Amino acid sequence: MTIRRCLPWPDKRLRTKAEPVAEVTEEIRAIWQDMVDTMEAMPGVGLAAPQIGVMLRLAVVDGSTERGRAVLMANPEILHASVELRAHEEASPNLPGVSAKLKRPRAVTVRYMNAAGVTTRRDFIGIEATSVQHQIDHLNGRMYFDNLSKTKRDMLLRKARKQKG
């Protein structure tokens, strides 16, 4: 079990688009395992590789109550998003101590390469849909607070700096 350190905001890697994964190798599987260990130690419902300084399009999501059901994804992309939105409080271990309520599509269909290296698609609903969208933002160099208005984003970052202080 390896718990990785999450990069502290404003590390520039958090603003960098991650590189696609060509194939699922033992090295990729080992990174996924570290990501699951790190996510569960937080505890959180998802983690993207750039959050731990690995600049690959890898994400893990586990919204189950019993844990141990993480979905391992390489190169995830949203194919379809529901019109219906769902509000959820979002946060990030890269900027601890602050969070914001965001509205995102309640359900998404995602295409990704699974642990066997096979491209598949899956529907995510509720907390897992929110988490997948949050992780894909990270893979594209975006943080959840980028979805806020400038005023709310500035307030959140000011509060985070004050807490770090």
Image: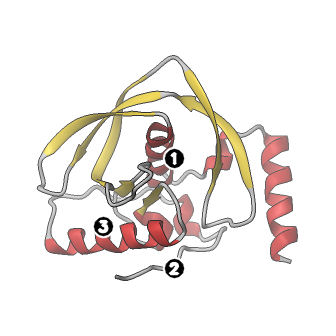
Picture disc at residue 134: 1
Q: Position of residue 52 (x, y in %)?
A: 47, 72
Residue closer to the observer: 146 or 109: 109
Mark 2 falls on what kind of element?
loop
- What amino acid does circle 1 point to? His
Q: In which quarter of the view is residue 79 placed?
A: top left
Circle 3: residue type = Trp
Question: Which numbered disc, 2 or 1, marks the residue that appears first in the sequence?
Answer: 2
Check the picture and name the quadrant holding the N terminus.
bottom left
Q: Identify which residue is drawn at 56% across, 74% down.
A: 7
Q: CA distance from mark 3 to mark 1?
A: 17 Å
Whether the residues at callouts 2 and 3 have beta carbons within 8 Å, the answer is no
State how far apart marks 2 and 3 are (Cα). 14 Å
Q: Is residue 133 left or right of residue 27?
A: right
- As drawn, 81 above or below 73: above
Q: Residues within 10 Å of mark 3 (few under 14, many from 20)?
A: many
Q: CA distance from mark 2 to mark 1?
A: 19 Å
Mark 2 vs 3, N-terminal side: 2
Asked if the residue at tag 1 contacts the one at tag 3, i.e. Cβ–Cβ closer than 8 Å, the answer is no
Q: How is the image coloured?
A: secondary structure
> For the residue labelled by badge 3, is the local secondary structure a helix, a strand or a loop?
helix
Q: Which mark is residue 78?
A: none
Q: Earlier in the sequence, mark 3 or mark 1?
A: 3
Q: Which residue lies under the disc numbered 3?
A: 32
Q: From the viewer's perspective, is 129 left or right of 12?
A: left
Residue located beneath label 2 in the image: 5
- Residue 129 place in picture, x, y as percent: 45, 37
Q: Residue at x 44, y 48 (%)?
A: 63
Residue type of the residue flagged with mark 2: Arg
Q: Quadrant of the C terminus?
A: bottom right
Above or below for 144 versus 107: below
